């Protein structure tokens, strides 16, 4: 378990105090017939810019801009704060105007993808470690190809040595599908055991037709199957941890643009 | 079928002839060595023929540099050399490079100055380095262009025919303490450490000479730094120094034997050279001077690592103290084995009883005392780190795989601070949820520095980091081959147009050795550590046992 650090405690206190101050200001502005949404709107927009700057920091790693760990904590807490501030700003869960709905939709999507990303980053690394395998993402396709070649070599050796095509037939009817590319994506994503069950079932299905020597080849094939499952798991989880950003970041940029335009419109027509 | 490989299958010098050996045997001071003392399987003639080579230097050539690690000593056959006493030669003259740390904005310019292709170099600067190529890459040397100016500005001493130098660094695996250069054309006999060790073993006068040199130059300083002998006055300290014995265990080029041992699946204390065995009775305390040794106790069918000892640590003190108190011999409670090359001094029990034990307020503690209270799992990470020789690292890249999201932000940060090519691979050996990535660990015993022909790989003056001077690196790959952890890589370099630079003669690509330099030139420390958003990556030294204890939980 990760410890509850001082940074976390300070973040909660600062953000809690800021939110309380803004809520108080809003009440006072409302009571004084002012524009209660003006200050919360500006703070919210500034927060969007600050949250987006985390991505820029990653590209500026050659200069000392503070540890990315601190930025990540601020980004996470800032995201939670943005949600609270958004509700304080709009005073509703879902606005009525079309433009505002677009803005709200984008905001909720960015928040949702952010939460999903945060959850994945918390849950997936330990699952990868528990496979006992460590592999760089870009090498996974090569490893999958190697496993497939090994599997085909086993089947060929079996056929050649024993002059029996039972295992080969089963391979090309069923197992080839599995070895072709990553399978059981959703099962891997959600921690299921579908792949293990499938391999076990395939083994049971064909084993009754095999001789003692053929069973030894089948055992080797099954071991390769389990090795591939570990590779698949790495592929799926590492893909998820990389690709969620391809949704989160573009949506954030779109949100920033729409929010900026919202700010302009408010200044032109409402103030 | 093949003939079993023998020690002298690969002589140090390919050109040594019987005639050369005959001449050497008549030349001072080799003529003083009693060759009858040498056994038949290791005759003096064989040592001269196979463990030495004659090297010629031109005026100005630097023979050894202060701060270098070397595995050879040199005997002046003819010519004159100069040893620089004070002040030391400027680092740029030695082929070193003082890394200037960039300012914030200079560092920021890398954002747009990094090329699309990696490893681009300004080739004009290579022409400025004072390099002289030899017949092969291992004989390229740095030379001084203006000897009179050096002699004017620096106090030097002359080394003439018959002078021996570099033996302490070669035998003790410590950095060379002075720079020596050729004043005129000179012929030197380079003796590799194996030959030096054999001569020291079989020739008493040679051994006495080496030991006396060590006693005079380094031993008393080393003893004074220990808590046990630190309080002694000059006379007592001299008596202690006179009484100690010097020992070396293991192989100097341990990284080669270690890799072979790993390849054969032989790991653990049972396969390492024994220095002292559990159950034996000690006759003195062993103080580690250089290198590492494993302290282990027998457990079941194997050995449990209790800890490892490095420079300054001692072994068997508590057992000798118990013997002194109880008046009967106490056996060793642990074994000591060499993790690579270990250089120790043995201080005898009577000396300890006279000068050390009476002053001790309490019984000296042994690491074995605490081990009984620890579960096997508590020490599992230590066992692994010792087995993998990661204990050598002072700045190892430790990644917590339970936190690492494999985003490669660390790799990108490294690339962006090193001209577009990362200086490490986010891959390496793992234990539980820890990984030591393939990044230079800036070792306590930097074997990569042994044999660099130009001194391009060296320690920085500030911080002691191991860095490579790109200007003087000749891409021979000696350092990369020596690194036991595969943390140095040779890269093909390009000119500013992005073309791979080719050797004028062979048309082969020009290589340079690259490795992690802890972002020495960039402000803010290692970019990889700063770039990790999950606090998964840190640089650690394994010299502190707490590294293991704190991180297991």
Image (cartoon, coloured by chain):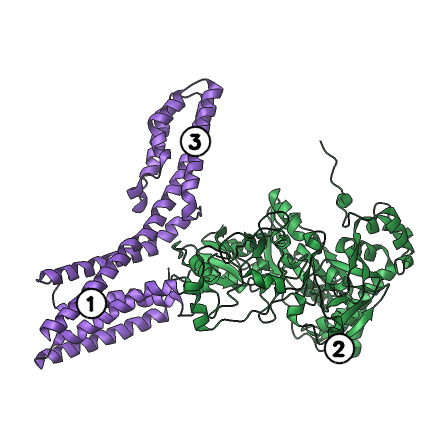
In this picture, residue A175 sits left or right of residue B23: left
As displayed, is residue B444 above or below residue A35? above
Q: Which residue is mark 3?
A: A151
Q: Chain of mark 1?
A: A
Residues B416 and B498: in front is: B498
Q: Which residue is mark 1?
A: A260
Q: Quadrant of the N terminus of chain A?
A: bottom left
Residues B151 and B281: in front is: B151
Is circle 3 on the same chain as circle 1? yes
Q: Quadrant of the C terminus of chain A?
A: bottom left
Is circle 3 on the same chain as circle 2? no
Shown colour of chain B:
green
Local SS, label 3:
helix
Mark 3 vs mark 2: give the one in front.
2
Local SS, label 2:
helix
Quadrant housing residue A122:
bottom left
């Amino acid at each position: 378990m990760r410890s509850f650090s001082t940074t976390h405690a300070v973040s909660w206190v600062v953000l809690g105090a800021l939110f309380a101050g803004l809520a108080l200001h809003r009440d006072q502005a409302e009571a004084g017939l002012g524009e209660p949404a003006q200050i919360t709107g500006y703070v919210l927009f500034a927060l969007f810019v600050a949250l987006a700057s985390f991505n820029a920091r990653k590209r500026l790693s050659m200069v000392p801009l503070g540890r990315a760990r601190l930025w990540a904590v601020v980004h996470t807490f800032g995201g939670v704060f943005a949600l609270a501030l958004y509700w304080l700003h709009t005073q509703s869960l879902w606005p009525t105007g079309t433009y505002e709905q677009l803005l709200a939709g984008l905001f909720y999507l960015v928040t949702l993808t952010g939460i999903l990303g945060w959850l994945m980053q918390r849950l997936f690394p330990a699952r990868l470690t528990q496979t006992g395998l460590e592999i760089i993402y870009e090498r996974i396709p090569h490893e999958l190809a190697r496993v497939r070649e090994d599997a085909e070599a086993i089947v060929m050796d079996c056929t050649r040595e024993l002059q029996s095509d039972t295992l080969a037939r089963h391979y090309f009817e069923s197992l080839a599908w599995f070895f072709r590319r990553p399978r059981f994506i959703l099962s891997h994503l959600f921690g299921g055991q579908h792949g293990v069950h499938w391999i076990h079932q395939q083994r049971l299905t064909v084993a009754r037709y095999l001789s003692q020597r053929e069973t030894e080849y089948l055992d080797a094939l099954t071991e390769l199957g389990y090795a591939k499952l570990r590779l698949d798991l790495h592929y799926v989880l590492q893909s998820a941890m990389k690709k969620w950003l391809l949704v989160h970041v573009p949506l954030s940029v779109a949100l920033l643009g729409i929010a900026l335009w919202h700010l302009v419109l408010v200044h032109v027509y409402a103030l | 079928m093949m003939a079993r490989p023998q020690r002298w299958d690969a002589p140090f010098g390919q050109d040594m002839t019987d005639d050369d050996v005959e001449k050497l045997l008549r030349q001072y001071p080799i003529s003083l060595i009693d060759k009858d003392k040498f056994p038949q399987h290791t005759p003096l003639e064989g040592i001269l023929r196979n463990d030495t080579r004659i090297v010629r230097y031109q005026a100005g050539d630097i023979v050894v540099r202060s701060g270098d690690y070397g595995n050879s000593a040199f005997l002046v056959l003819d010519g004159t050399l100069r040893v620089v006493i004070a002040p030391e030669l400027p680092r740029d003259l030695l082929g070193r490079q003082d890394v200037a740390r960039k300012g914030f904005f200079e560092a920021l310019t890398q954002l747009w100055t990094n090329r699309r292709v990696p490893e681009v170099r300004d080739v004009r600067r290579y022409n400025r380095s004072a390099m002289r190529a030899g017949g092969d890459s291992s004989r390229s040397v740095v030379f001084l262009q203006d000897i009179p100016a050096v002699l004017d500005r620096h106090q030097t001493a002359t080394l003439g025919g018959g002078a021996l130098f570099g033996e302490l660094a070669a035998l003790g695996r410590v950095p060379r303490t002075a720079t020596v250069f050729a004043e005129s054309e000179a012929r030197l006999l380079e003796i590799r450490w194996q030959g030096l060790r054999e001569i020291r073993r079989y020739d008493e006068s040679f051994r006495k000479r080496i030991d006396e040199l060590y006693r005079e130059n380094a031993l008393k300083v080393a003893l004074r730094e220990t808590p046990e002998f630190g309080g002694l006055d000059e006379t007592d300290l001299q008596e202690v120094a006179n009484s100690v014995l010097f020992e070396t265990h293991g192989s100097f080029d341990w990284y080669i034997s270690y890799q072979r041992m790993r390849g054969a699946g032989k790991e653990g204390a049972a396969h390492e050279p024994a220095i002292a065995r559990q159950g034996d009775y000690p006759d003195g305390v062993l103080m580690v001077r250089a290198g590492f040794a494993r302290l282990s106790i027998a457990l079941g069918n194997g050995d449990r690592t209790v800890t490892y000892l490095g420079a300054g640590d001692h072994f068997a003190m508590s057992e000798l103290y118990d013997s002194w108190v109880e008046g009967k011999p106490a056996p060793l409670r642990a074994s000591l084995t060499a993790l690579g090359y270990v250089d120790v001094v043995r201080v005898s029990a009577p000396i300890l009883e006279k000068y050390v034990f009476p002053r001790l307020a309490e019984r000296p503690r042994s690491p074995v005392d605490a081990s009984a209270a620890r579960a096997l799992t508590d020490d599992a990470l230590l066992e692994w780190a010792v087995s993998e020789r990661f204990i050598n690292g002072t700045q190892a890249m430790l990644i917590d795989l339970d936190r690492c999201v494999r985003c490669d932000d660390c790799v990108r940060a490294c690339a962006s601070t090193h001209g577009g090519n990362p200086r490490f691979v986010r891959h390496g050996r793992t234990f539980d949820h820890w990984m030591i990535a393939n990044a230079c660990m800036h070792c306590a015993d930097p074997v990569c520095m042994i044999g660099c022909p130009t001194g391009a790989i060296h320690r920085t003056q500030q911080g002691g980091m191991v860095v490579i001077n790109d200007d003087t690196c000749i891409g021979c790959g000696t350092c990369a081959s020596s690194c036991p952890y595969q943390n140095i890589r040779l890269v093909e370099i390009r000119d500013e147009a992005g073309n791979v630079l080719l050797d004028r003669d062979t048309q082969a690509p020009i290589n340079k050795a690259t490795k992690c330099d802890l972002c020495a030139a960039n402000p803010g420390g290692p970019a990889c550590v700063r770039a990790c958003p999950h606090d998964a990556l840190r640089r650690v030294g394994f010299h502190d046992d707490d590294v293991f204890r704190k991180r297991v939980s």
